[in-house]
Image: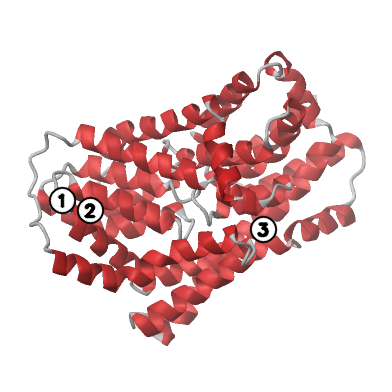
Amino acid sequence: MTVAVFTISLLGAMALGMPIAFALLVCAVALMVMQGQIDATILSQKLIEGADSFPLLAIPFFMLAGELMNAGGISKRIVAFALTWVGHVRGGLGLVAIFAAVVMAAISGSAAADAAAIGTLLIPMMRQAGYNVPRSAGLIAAGGVIAPVIPPSIGLIVFGVIANVSIGKLFLAGIFPGLMMGTALVLTWLWVARKDKVAILPKQGWGLRLKAGIDGIWALVMPLGIIGGLKFGIFTPTEAGVAACVYAFVVGAFVYRELPLRQLYPLLVSAARSTAVVVFLIAAALVSAWLITLSDVPGQVSAMLEPFMGNKILLMFVIMAIVVIVGTALDFAPTLMILTPVLMPVIKQAGIDPVYFGVLFIMNNAIGLITPPVGIVLNVICGVAKIPMSDLMKGLWPFLWAEIAVLFLLVLFPDLVLIPLKWLS
């Protein structure tokens, strides 16, 4: 009965067009009504407590770092560097897109922002060179969703706060799965684009490559600085956000000199607006999470999954399949906010490592960003490439299936996530 009240109240509020944060609060009130203890004071206190979290301070800084990176010329130089090395090979522009996606993922952590930045730079070039535009756009969309997996990931920060899991461990555990996603895209792109007759860019000499490397060195060392600082304990994930923000500002304003100080205020406003949405969502989710636990929803879900509890891999397959299906109907944030408090008790009861689960859960939610009809990255790329959704989906399918294959490969072989964590710890 409790699960039914939870599901009907949440989906009903969303069906009425209510923003997801308010839908979560409606769900919380419905659970309170069911228990006969309506108390607006407790509700407001829990809402404030949900936003009162030190790790959440990382979110506005990484949001701002992404804005500064794009405005300050860092994204442009990452693409230019890759072009000098692989632009001349067949399918080279696609390889550039994947390289840029992986490097930018290690800086901003925002799938939509990375996909938009790379698409704006590369799709016109790929169109002019004769590449299949829907396929090229599909590749860039699939590359964009690497961002929530590779640290610094806003999704991993949010999951760590809601699930009470070490964000530092989540960051380190996300490196190898993110690189696997990039490798899968490279192999898939080389296969599907092998027969395309496209214009090949002239091979660049070592002088131009060196020049592009020197020009882009400030952009390329940024991910190494963030990950290295986390590994060696120089700063916490929250402090890493501050470091990334300061670094992006100094490089954009004083090294590349493409970030006038007058642009700083609009960038701060944009980052603040994005942060406000995310933090309010988290606060509302933690209110509903408290009532979900109080109402024993996880216990009832555990009972439903009882037949699979004896086999961790089978249980993970079932959960990941459910999340894939949910991801086609809900966006990244709602899926993360709703399912984390429901699934975490099940994961702990089954003895599954919460860091391992968190990385796969975030990867699954990231893939949901490119599954129709809701995927926000799809809508971003459609706008950038100026193509209809139906055309984009035709080009996207090979890359979508490649990333789903990586997800379920990691379900079968958990050590691919956990062993690198042990190496880097």
In the image, which disc is placed on residue 123? 2
Q: Is residue 49 left or right of residue 284?
A: right
Colouring rule applied to residues: secondary structure
Q: Disc 3 designates what residue?
A: 280
Report helix, strand or loop for mark 3.
Answer: helix
Q: Is residue 21 visible?
A: no
Which of pointers 3 and 2 indicates the residue nearer the eye?
A: 2
Identify the image quadrant of the N terminus: top right
CA distance separating discs 3 and 2: 35 Å
Report helix, strand or loop for mark 2.
Answer: helix
Q: Observer-nearest residue: 76 or 340?
A: 76
Q: Confirm or deny contact between disc 2 and disc 1 (CB under 8 A).
A: yes
Tell which circle, 1 or 3, labels the residue nearer the N-terminal end.
1
Q: Is residue 351 above or below residue 193?
A: above
Q: Is residue 345 above or below residue 97?
A: above
In the image, which disc is placed on residue 127? 1
> Badge 2 local density, few (<14 within 10 Å), some, or many (20+)?
many
Residue type at mark 3: give it: Phe
Q: Position of residue 327 (x, y in %)?
A: 52, 35
User: Residue at point 67% right, 49% down?
Assistant: 160
Residue type at mark 2: give it: Ile
Q: Quadrant of residue 335?
A: top right
Q: Position of residue 208 (x, y in %)?
A: 16, 68
Q: Is residue 64 above or below residue 104?
A: below
Which of pointers 1 and 3 indicates the residue nearer the eye?
A: 1
Q: Position of residue 387 (x, y in %)?
A: 25, 46
CA distance separating discs 2 and 1: 6 Å
CA distance separating discs 1 and 3: 40 Å
Q: Is residue 53 visible?
A: yes
Tell which circle, 3 or 2, labels the residue nearer the N-terminal end.
2
